[in-house]
Amino acid sequence: EKRASAVKRPAGGWQHDSGRSVQNAKIGETVSGTVTNIMNKRVWVSAGFVKDVTFRTDRPERYQVGDELQDLVVSAINTEKDVVEVEFKRTSRRQRMAEKWAEPKRPQQQQRQRQRQQQGQQQQQSQQQKRPATKAKARAAAPIPAGPRSASRASPS
């Protein structure tokens, strides 16, 4: 399904005279930039080269012109057409989760986390008060029953 371009082509074209030459691009290089156009399931990003870099997406609605994108890795270079293909840096789920938890938390998140910790501590304390910690402590705390055996031992006949 072909869609119209998100923005009209500028009068001077998509060239950036002050950008780096496509021949200077290196596969594996990480770049970042601003989305300049979205068309035909392709996103175009101004990443400092003479021409915008591009990548294919199945969900172009995720992006808007002006979005800042980071961690784009150069995956292919076509020097004949001056095209640089990029893709998002691949990270494992474990790496993404580590980065997420390493980020500074917002005040509301910090407050909720403190509340959860306090609730957990209160629950632990109430459970410890309800039951003795060990069987030995439970026997020591229980009263010794006075029964017929103890009375018969006390007075020999």
Image: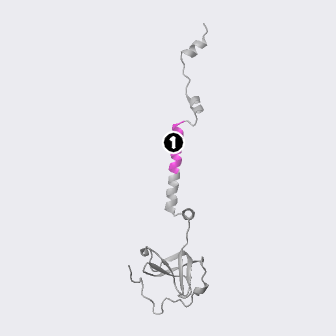
Tell me the SS state at disc 1: helix
Residue 51 in the figure: left or right of residue 58: right
Q: Residue furthest bottom?
A: 12
Q: Whole-percent x and y of residue 26?
A: 61, 80
Name the image quarter holding the C terminus.
Answer: top right
Name the image quarter holding the N terminus.
Answer: bottom left
Q: Residues within 10 Å of mark 1 (few under 14, many from 20)?
A: few
- Judging depth in this view, the residue of 44 and 131 nearest the camera is 44
Residue 75 in the figure: left or right of residue 5: right
Q: Residue furthest top?
A: 157
Looking at the rendering, the stretch of residues picked out in magenta corresponds to 118-131
**Quadrant of res 25:** bottom right
When the figure is inspected, residue 142 is found, relative to residue 8, above or below; the finding is above
Q: Whole-percent x and y of residue 4?
A: 39, 83
In terms of secondary structure, what is the magenta stretch mainly?
A: helix
Tag 1 residue: 126
When the figure is inspected, residue 92 is found, relative to residue 84, above or below; the finding is above
Q: Whole-percent x and y of residue 34?
A: 50, 80
Residue 129 covered by magenta stretch: yes
Which residue is pictured at 50% across the width and 77% down the height? 68
Q: Whole-percent x and y of residue 91?
A: 56, 67
When the figure is inspected, residue 103 is found, relative to residue 116, above or below; the finding is below
Which residue is pictured at 56% across the width and 31% down the height? 138
Q: How many marks?
A: 1
Amino acid type, residue under disc 1 in the picture: Ser
Which residue is pictured at 57% across the width and 14% down the height? 151
Specify how the rendered protein is coloured: one colour
- Judging depth in this view, the residue of 99 and 21 nearest the camera is 21
